[in-house]
Amino acid sequence: MTHTALDLQDKIILVTGSSRGIGLATANLLYERGAKVVIHARSSTSHLDGLLNQFGENVRLVLGDLSRINGAENVWSKAISYFGHIDVLVNNAGAWLPSDITSSQTWREGWESNIAINLTAPAELCRLALLHFKQRHGGIIINITSRSAHRGDDAEHLAYGAAKGGLLALTKGIARGYGRDNILAYAIAPGWVATDLADGAIELSVLENLPLGEVTPASDVAEIVAFLATGRSRHTTGATIDITGADYVR
């Protein structure tokens, strides 16, 4: 295998939600750069066996529903069991779920679902990673948030924006609070990305108004994850990197 200047050889990286979309593109690139990767999916699907055969022994799969009680702990412990430790956590798993304000029940259900998968689950994985990294005298956390963390989301997805905003604040707090432990934390905030999650959600009028005239390819996000995972930009810790094709500029 030929490694690039962004060599990740000997890095062990857990990427949640990596059976498709941003997560799969990221896992692919990390593997190509020499990392050992633990990919995660909520449940078994027919294409996962093919993925594992394609990757080889340096990629392992862990199944688990992160929104369930003890889901994060189970995924984390299984991931560590494969290679003995984790160097980098990439919190990518998420869901763009509606939060209907019509009734208290629909609002509560939408709110709780969004918070569970988009904030509580990655926060619990961050907690476990922090304990692990403190023992190992360092580590890296990369949280995939959203432009919604800055600007809020639309009327049907208020809870999603709130959850992603919480994850962004958590990332900043980790960077500030654990930098002396050699733990680095970064946030990546994509806009529209060409994934299954966005399929059917992007209207032609939206596409026509994007400055680059196209949605962001998942590989663009993967490239930033791979760079941050090297640890070669320590003083970027605490920063949020926007990947929106200038659709949203702060």
Image (cartoon, helix red, strand yellow):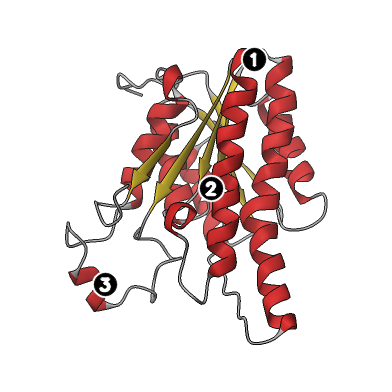
Front-most of residues 50 and 135: 135
The residue labelled by disc 2 is 92
CB of mark 2 within 8 Å of CB of mark 1?
no
The residue labelled by disc 3 is 206
Badge 2 marks a residue whose secondary structure is loop
Mark on residue 201? Answer: none
Camera sees residue 43: no
Determine the image quadrant of residue 81: top right
Quadrant for the N terminus in the image: top left
**Kind of residue at badge 2:** Asn
The residue labelled by disc 1 is 181
Badge 2: few (under 14), some or many (20 or more) residues near its Cα, within 10 Å?
many
Give the answer, above or below, for where 129 lies relative to 19: above
Q: Position of residue 66 (x, y in %)?
A: 70, 53
Badge 1: few (under 14), some or many (20 or more) residues near its Cα, within 10 Å?
some
Front-most of residues 5 and 44: 5
96 displayed left or right of 2: right
What is the residue that sits farthest to the right in this orientation? Answer: 69
Badge 1 marks a residue whose secondary structure is helix
Badge 3: few (under 14), some or many (20 or more) residues near its Cα, within 10 Å?
few
121 displayed left or right of 26: right
Badge 3 marks a residue whose secondary structure is helix
